[in-house]
Amino acid sequence: MKRRFDKYFPWLFLVADFLAISLALWICTSILVNLSLFDPVPFFAVLPLSFLWLLIAGLRKDYKIGRTDDYEATLKHLGVTVFWFLGAMAILWVPLHKPQFQLIPIVVFGLGLMLLLGIFRVSIHMMLKNYRAKGNNYRNAVIIGKGGTSPRLADVFRIRKDFGINFLGYFDNDAQCDQTRGDVASFFNQAEDLDLDLIYIHEQLEPNTVRKIINFADENYIKVKMIPGGSLQLEKNLSFSRYGDFFVINVNEIPLDNAFNAVLKRVFDILFSAFMIVAVLSWLIPLVGILIKWESKGPIFFIQKRNGINNSVFNCLKFRSMTPNDYADEKQATKNDPRVTKIGAFLRRTSLDEMPQFINVLLGDMSIVGPRPHTVPMNKDFKTQIERYDSRHKIRPGITGLAQVRGYRGEIENPYQIRNRVRLDSFYIHNWSFLLDMGIMAKTFREVVSNKDDAY
């Protein structure tokens, strides 16, 4: 079953998705009703929402689950669909407007749909992978040009059966092996009998030959993909820019270069930081301020110059946890540091000293999640010691980050600690997702509650 599956799968997927969304909406509505957060609604009132979901999912082609996509890509695609659905739901669904617009039900629906439909979509993805691994729903492919990284791609096809790509062999003018079907010229004679779906071209082929292969593929409705050389294989995320008829590869583009991703992260930062300022800092600042002033003379806040996005310098806010001294910018806090006050030790141990940084987030200097900012003198020092250190300033620094939840918080005693921080920061920058941010925030809360050994 090669192509017949593709003909029926979108319809099967949409029908199953309709049933899944109907069940998910019913569960979310029942939870809200039981919590007295929502007026009871009959089940038939939910059905229009299921059809609305079907329309959005169909327009976004959610049924197209890529052969080489990972589960995170499926969840990310689902997240965008849920976002559009919630927006349309908030505008069109009358029960949400009675007696007035209700934000909490929208949040519950959003979280519930992501959880329940996430389980459903990932299950479908797993079933597809298993189905293809057994030799079904495959695509026939050849590689033209057996050099450089081509054998690595052939190994991927051999190992990752779940991609459903049936590798038929190479066409190359020089290579002679069991998988070589002939030279490049013989490809055009054999292609019609191979029932090809995919052609992979090695980048070192002559431009005229590449053009001829692409023209042939266009005439026979075959997809063509180029195999990048070894240097480009080191980069995970590649995209293209067009200058008229000329294309270039964007080698070091990151997820937050995408306008939607950047806006999503910034909107969340604004909403969450505004909530924390109103709900927590409004009473925490006066309370902590009194305690700080009661124990020692000096300001309530400790304002320190730190490097932010694009290495710009900003004033980072913290509750003052030390007696005023001339070494705060150059000397890190150490265990049993005599400069730390009693209330300061408590603030550091509970990470409450970082709370004013939500003001930095609202002002745009920082983000909730990102690489932790260092002082300007420390930054200059680390820059001379660690290769590509400044690449961590591609995005806004964070109140918390991936390195911190992986155990690299507090004093930097050994060179490996800052190297690992930079490595984890780089991974975060190049693999950012909204779900990753949510996971880091959840782990940060757990760390603050349970593990305080490195905070002093």
Image: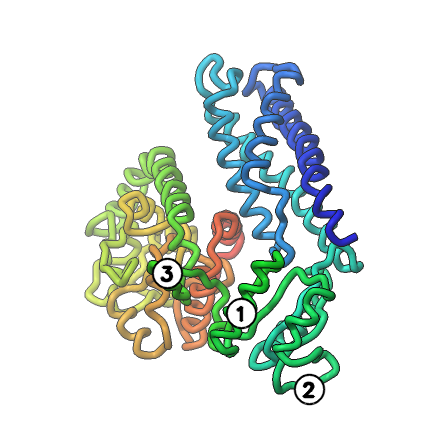
Q: Amino acid at mark 3?
A: Asp
Place residue 217 in its image quadrant: bottom right
- Residues at marks 3 and 2, CA–CA distance in whole angstroms: 37 Å
**Label 3: element kind:** loop
The vertical placement of 94 against 399, above or below, is above
With 392 as the anchor, is 20 left or right in this view? right
Residue that lies at the very extreme toward the top in this rendered image? 99
**Label 2: element kind:** loop
Camera-near label (3 vs 1) is: 1
Identify which residue, 167 or 131, lies in the foreground: 167
Mark toward the start of the polypeptide (1 vs 2)? 2
- Residues at marks 3 and 1, CA–CA distance in whole angstroms: 18 Å
The vertical placement of 159 against 45, above or below, is below
Q: Amino acid at mark 1?
A: Lys
Check if mark 1's residue and mark 2's residue have beta carbons within 8 Å: no
Check if mark 3's residue and mark 2's residue have beta carbons within 8 Å: no
According to the picture, the residue beneath numbered tag 2 turns out to be 176
Identify which residue, 212 or 93, lies in the foreground: 212
With 167 as the anchor, is 410 left or right in this view? left
Examine the rendering and report whether any part of residue 372 can be seen.
Answer: no
- Residues at marks 1 and 2, CA–CA distance in whole angstroms: 23 Å
Mark toward the start of the polypeptide (3 vs 1)? 1
Q: Residues within 10 Å of mark 2 (few under 14, many from 20)?
A: some
Q: Residues within 10 Å of mark 1 (few under 14, many from 20)?
A: few
Question: In the drawing, what numbered circle is on residue 245?
Answer: 3
According to the picture, the residue beneath numbered tag 1 turns out to be 212
